[in-house]
Each structure stands twice: as structure tokens, then as C-alpha cells.
Image (cartoon, rainbow, N blue to C red):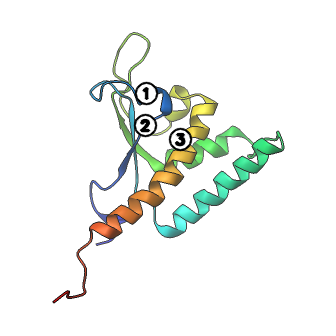
Amino acid sequence: MPAKFRPGSGFEVVLSGDRDMPEDQRSTFIARVLTYEESKVLQRVVESVDKAKADKDMPFASTDELFAILEKNITGWRHMTDEAGGDIGYGPGLLSSIVSLSEGFELLGLLTAQGIGAAERKKSESPSDCSTD
């Protein structure tokens, strides 16, 4: 069964500002496994973001486009807390209220890079059909 359709498949994404935190406190996003085609689409989006940065331009008609992409690919999170330390449970549509615009762009890059890497790891973990005898 392809990883995309395997229940519980996905990979973790951690923003650079949280990487040094203890694992049991580190805010961690859960992203869905991307197909090759989805990875290519996201890679093109990241390339347009990079070009727009170089041109000092905005890569989207509105930031809602960025968060729509993120909302489609982020399927959960762990250890997300508010200023008072209260738990923020995952829910569709909440992402834009908890991350900044720059963190949104960072998440987009991480999704693309790790999505491609996760797909490659899943492929390499699959048993080979070839006999080595």
C-alpha cells in the first residue's frame, strides 16, 4: 500500500526556533506523506517563493494561499501551547492563528524538503522484490 494511504503515515516537522527544546515540550507539526506529484507542486511553490524573495515581492496574491497549502498538508500537532501554557488542540483552520507569516514560509520549505526525504525513506524501507540469492 502506498505510504499516502497508510493509516498513521506522516512525518514530523519542527520549526527552527523549537529544535533545541526538550522533545516532550517541542512544538511538533505532523504532515501528511506527499506523493511525487504533490512534492513537485510544492517544490514549484517554494521556487516561486525564493524568486519573489530575491525580487522583494510577494509570491502569493494573498497570504491566505500560503496557509491554504499548509492547512492541506499539516494534519496535526503535538506540544502546542499558548502563552499561559495551555494546550492548543489541533483543528483545521487554526494554523494561521498560531504561527507567524515567516514561520508559515519556513513550514512550507520544511514540508517540501522533508516530504521528498520521507517519501524516499519510505521507498527505501520497502522490502525489495528482487532476490539477492
Whether residue 64 sits left or right of residue 11 in the image: it is right
Q: Describe the element under mark 3 as helix, strand or loop.
A: helix
Q: Position of residue 93 (x, y in %)?
A: 50, 37
Residue drawn 56% across the image and 45% down it: 108
Mark 1 and mark 2: span between their CA atoms? 6 Å
Name the residue that disc number 3 marks. 107
Sequence-wise, the earlier of marks 3 and 2 is 2
Mark 3 and mark 2: span between their CA atoms? 8 Å
Badge 1 density bin: few <14, some 14–19, many ≥20, Cα 10 Å: few
User: Which residue type carries mark 2?
Assistant: Val
User: Which residue type carries mark 1?
Assistant: Asp
* Quadrant of the rendering where the N terminus is positioned: bottom left
Mark 1 and mark 3: span between their CA atoms? 12 Å
Along the line of sight, the residue nearer the viewer: 109 or 82: 109
Residue 14's tag is: 2
Position of 74 relative to 87 (above/below) = below
| Circles 1, 2 touching at the beta carbon (< 8 Å) | yes
Q: Describe the element under mark 2 as helix, strand or loop.
A: loop
Residue drawn 35% across the image and 16% down it: 86
Residue 18's tag is: 1
Position of 85 relative to 35 (above/below) = above
Position of 80 relative to 30 (above/below) = above
